[in-house]
């Protein structure tokens, strides 16, 4: 792998390569697809535009003429066998990420995280055992932890249905890697923000919702006392991580935390947001009941395993990321919420 | 909880209680149902008699007039709401346990372990939040381990789809315990043998299959060099453990290994089987490919957490358990194979 000083653009490894992005109209998927298309990869995205997920056709507006868009369900074996043929890389970013939705409708969460992953892996098994798969797992699989920072050796003790299903989906990848030789790895993402996130409602995480409130100049309610610590990544750094991982065969079969060199408290994050925005305000409010039971308190990772294996480090400063994010939604507000 | 010397019959705690056993026509479920019926519990069993599972009407022959048998699918919400009303205890023993089958048909394994568990828990959430639930998890969730004996603090690194789905099903119980207050715990069972096991084929574990070969006087093929160590429990001890656990509110929300004070090598086990049987023979053969990739080598647990919490210890000696088992199948051979 390139050392850190040369890791300026991991998308170069994908020039001319055939790449499939599941959930490619969603937040992370569309950012991956745009970066890869810009680097000269031959990109196909599959997305169901399921109304409970984050897909949005506008997300791929900059590259819509350069990539192949297949609206369809990852659980459809015929579709998946068709789109998988000849792909060299698969970024598996389809799925549900809402903790609250997963508690309301656990069956849907099971379908969209577990069955869809098995459908992808089974299709690989039948038509394409050569592709490299990168799965976007989540820090949510850890649940509440005893020790900070959290390394990959910490027990997984998920506190909601979404965390359980993401844990299972991660391990399906690793089982298919070891049993069927379908090269796969899992990155456990931390809180991620940036352009192209679903902001229609507050159910996909607090960060995007806070950004929307800041754009609209509304007051932000921070649950709890604001001292909970999180590591927060800007989307471009996460795309870097996914691309570096997929291009590195030595990492296959592995699990890697992402993270940040400078975790922040929720209050620090919101203060920076309000400052950069020049708009909005915030207050601290008690947790609502349905959120308290699945809140995990402070959380940040040790991501040295991934950093040492790849040279990856987050590069975008928080305020810089916030400025880019606010600018994007101000220009495209009507594409993301009323 | 009763101390060890008084823990002679944990079924006494269930006299007059309403108890539901899912998978109640299967190996472990039917043994639980028979013990509970004998202790004066009011027992309902639900079982789909799915041909890929271990259900067998003959298993409950001794108590068929004393218990309520509902043939149906745990995934059916109408059925589950109906049978759950008023139950004080639920032993959730439905599900798939075959590692090999789970790799052949991962979707079916997902349905019968994950969706069925969610259906049970959702039904509890809607009609019965007072029942205590005991889930039978498995050592298979640990996969290959770095250290022996294996405590509950070891990472779960399942090596097959069944192990992943059992891990998810276990955590669904724990999430519903903490979020919805539906009192649940998980016992991680080790290899279990005894009367009422599915012996039609070899796909539900080597022990039952070896017993069948011994009854028939056939040669037993032990995969590998026979030195792999396992902790093996006789069914009556496992039933004790399940009943002790369900009656102990202090254990709810917990995870507990079962295990054995005297783990044995596969060759020792088979030698004992051949000796007690007075019939049959064995040989060591290389692993077939499809088994080697999901074999976990030697495995035995530290079960002190459960022993200290409940006083439970396996009481049945290996040769005694084998004698009872062989006697049962000799008397009822035609109900289990051919």
Image: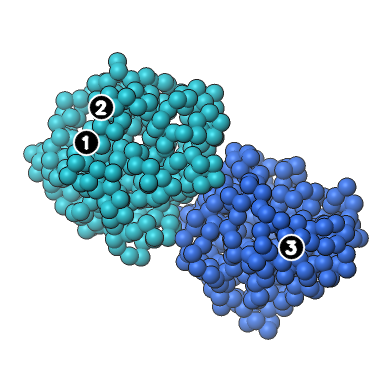
Chain colours: A cyan, B blue
Q: Mark 1 points at which residue?
A: A9
Q: Name the residue under label 2.
A: A39
Discs 1, 2 touching: Cβ within 8 Å? yes
Is the residue marked by circle 1 packed among few (<14), some (14-19), or many (20+) residues within 10 Å? few
Percent x, y for residue A294? Answer: 39, 53
Q: Name the residue under label 3.
A: B193
Q: Nearer the viewer, residue B91 or B320?
A: B320
Q: Quadrant of the N terminus of chain B?
A: bottom right
Q: What element carries label 1?
A: loop
Camera-nearest label, 2 or 3: 2
Residue B69 is left or right of residue A72, and the answer is right
Q: In which quarter of the image is residue B225?
A: bottom right
Q: Is mark 3 on a helix, strand or loop?
A: strand
Residue B76 shows in this picture: yes
Q: Which residue is found at the position 45% from the left and 41% from the top?
A: A183
Percent x, y for residue B77? Answer: 62, 41
Q: Above or below — where is A309 with respect to B265?
A: above
Q: In which quarter of the image is residue A329?
A: top left
For marks 1 and 2 on the same chain, the one whose residue lies earlier in the sequence: 1
Q: Which of A309 and A223 is in front in this view?
A: A309
Residue A197 shows in this picture: no
Give the Cα separation between the discs numbered 2 and 3. 58 Å
Subunit ID for the residue under disc 1: A
Q: Above or below — where is A253 with respect to B330?
A: above
Q: Mark on residue A263?
A: none
Give the Cα separation between the discs numbered 3 and 1. 57 Å
Q: Nearer the viewer, residue B300 or B32?
A: B300
Is the residue marked by circle 2 packed among few (<14), some (14-19), or many (20+) residues within 10 Å? some
Q: Is mark 2 on a helix, strand or loop?
A: loop
């Amino acid at each position: 792998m390139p050392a850190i000083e040369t890791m300026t653009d991991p998308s170069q490894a994908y020039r001319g390569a055939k790449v499939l992005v599941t959930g490619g109209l969603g937040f992370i998927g569309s950012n991956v697809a745009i970066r890869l298309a810009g680097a000269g990869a031959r990109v196909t995205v599959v997305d169901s535009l399921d109304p409970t997920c984050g897909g949005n056709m506008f997300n791929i507006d900059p590259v819509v003429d350069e990539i192949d868009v297949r609206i369809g369900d990852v659980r459809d074996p015929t579709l998946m066998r068709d789109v998988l043929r000849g792909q060299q890389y698969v970024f598996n970013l389809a799925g549900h990420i809402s903790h609250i939705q997963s508690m309301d409708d656990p069956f849907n969460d099971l379908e969209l995280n577990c069955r869809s992953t098995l459908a992808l892996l089974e299709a690989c098994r039948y038509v394409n055992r050569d592709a490299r798969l990168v799965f976007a797992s989540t820090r949510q699989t850890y649940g509440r932890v005893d020790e900070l920072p959290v390394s990959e050796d910490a027990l997984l003790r998920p506190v909601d249905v979404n965390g359980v299903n993401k844990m299972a989906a991660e391990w399906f990848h690793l089982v298919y890697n070891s049993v069927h030789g379908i090269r796969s790895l899992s990155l456990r993402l931390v809180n991620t923000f940036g352009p192209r996130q679903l902001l229609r409602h507050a159910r996909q995480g607090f960060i995007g919702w806070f950004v929307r409130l800041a754009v609209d100049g509304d007051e932000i309610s921070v649950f709890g006392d604001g001292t909970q610590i999180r590591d927060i990544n800007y989307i471009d750094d996460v795309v870097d991580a996914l691309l570096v991982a997929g291009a590195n065969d030595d990492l296959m079969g592995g699990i890697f935390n992402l993270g940040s060199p400078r975790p922040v408290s929720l209050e620090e994050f919101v203060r920076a947001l309000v400052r950069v925005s020049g708009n909005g305000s915030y207050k601290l409010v008690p947790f609502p009941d349905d959120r308290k039971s699945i809140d995990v308190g402070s959380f940040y990772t040790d991501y040295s395993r991934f950093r040492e294996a790849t040279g990856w480090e987050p590069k975008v400063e928080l305020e810089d990321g916030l400025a880019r994010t606010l600018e994007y939604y101000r220009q495209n507000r009507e594409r993301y919420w009323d």
